[in-house]
Image: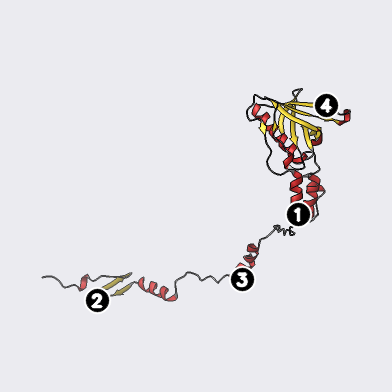
Amino acid sequence: MEIHKNELRGQCTSFAELNMLQRAHILETYGVDPHPCKDFTGSIAFLGFTATGFVVFQGNKRIHLLKWADVSKLKFEGKTFYVIGIQKESSLKKLVLTFHTSTPAACKHLWKCGVENQAFYKCAKSSQIKTVSSSNIFFKGSRFRYSGRVAKEVIEASSKIKREQPEVRRAQFGQSRSYNSLSHKNLIMNMEPLVPALPSTNEYEETAADNVKLSISPAGLSTRGSQLNLEQFLPMRG
């Protein structure tokens, strides 16, 4: 995040992405899937397999890097994982690194990941890869056979593919098109005038006429509201 804020600020999007990837791929932890375990002293360590080789981390510090060309064998027995290689700095002295996992299943998984990555990055052709087995004959399923292409074959096949320059469309920050087309200004301009829901003049006149109090003195006819008193006009029964 500090690199992104301080060194990539002000660059266009494409250059910032390219520079970020160039900085990331040279980091020691780039592409590492850490496997937790303990070394021979009981200290916590993290093992990983990269394109360069076998790596060991303690915290954020890399303490071992053994290139694939220098790794002669990977094996496991129970919870113990062994990395056997050659230490070129000490006149081709044999090097054995020992690590302990939490369970035998975790150790077997670590061993499979190791032999698979070693075959993928070290061998020139997939036809050269042989079935690998651990030294422990008591563990069932401790044989591993690699399937698929190796790194060199993938790179060669990829270089022969003719690809067109990809068109990258990046989202712009800010207002969207739908927001601009329905902006506040356009809404006001396109809005129809409001018609007040009030009664008309005729309705006012009819309402007023209904509420008028009428009185006729000679005949004694009186009207309150819209009701008439007609009792005086009914014939008297004999």
> Observer-nearest residue: 136 or 125?
125
**Viewer-nearest of discs 2 and 4:** 4
- Residue projecting furthest to the top: 41
- Residue where numbered disc 3 is placed: 189
Mark 2 vs mark 3, CA separation in Å: 64 Å
The x, y position of residue 81, in whole percent, is: 72, 27
Disc with the residue nearer the chain's start (2 vs 3): 3
Mark 4 vs mark 3, CA separation in Å: 84 Å
The x, y position of residue 16, in whole percent, is: 79, 52
> Observer-nearest residue: 113 or 213?
113
Q: Which mark is residue 160?
A: 1
| Residue at the image position 63 percent from the left and 30 percent from the top | 141
| Residue at the image position 74 percent from the left and 30 percent from the top | 74
- Residue where numbered disc 2 is placed: 219
Quadrant where the C terminus is found in the figure: bottom left
- Tell me if mark 4 has few (under 14), some (14-19) or many (20+) residues whose alpha carbon lies within 10 angstroms of its own: few
The x, y position of residue 68, in whole percent, is: 79, 36
Q: Secondary structure at mark 3?
A: helix
Quarter of the image for residue 191 reads bottom right
Disc with the residue nearer the chain's start (2 vs 4): 4
Mark 1 vs mark 4, CA separation in Å: 41 Å
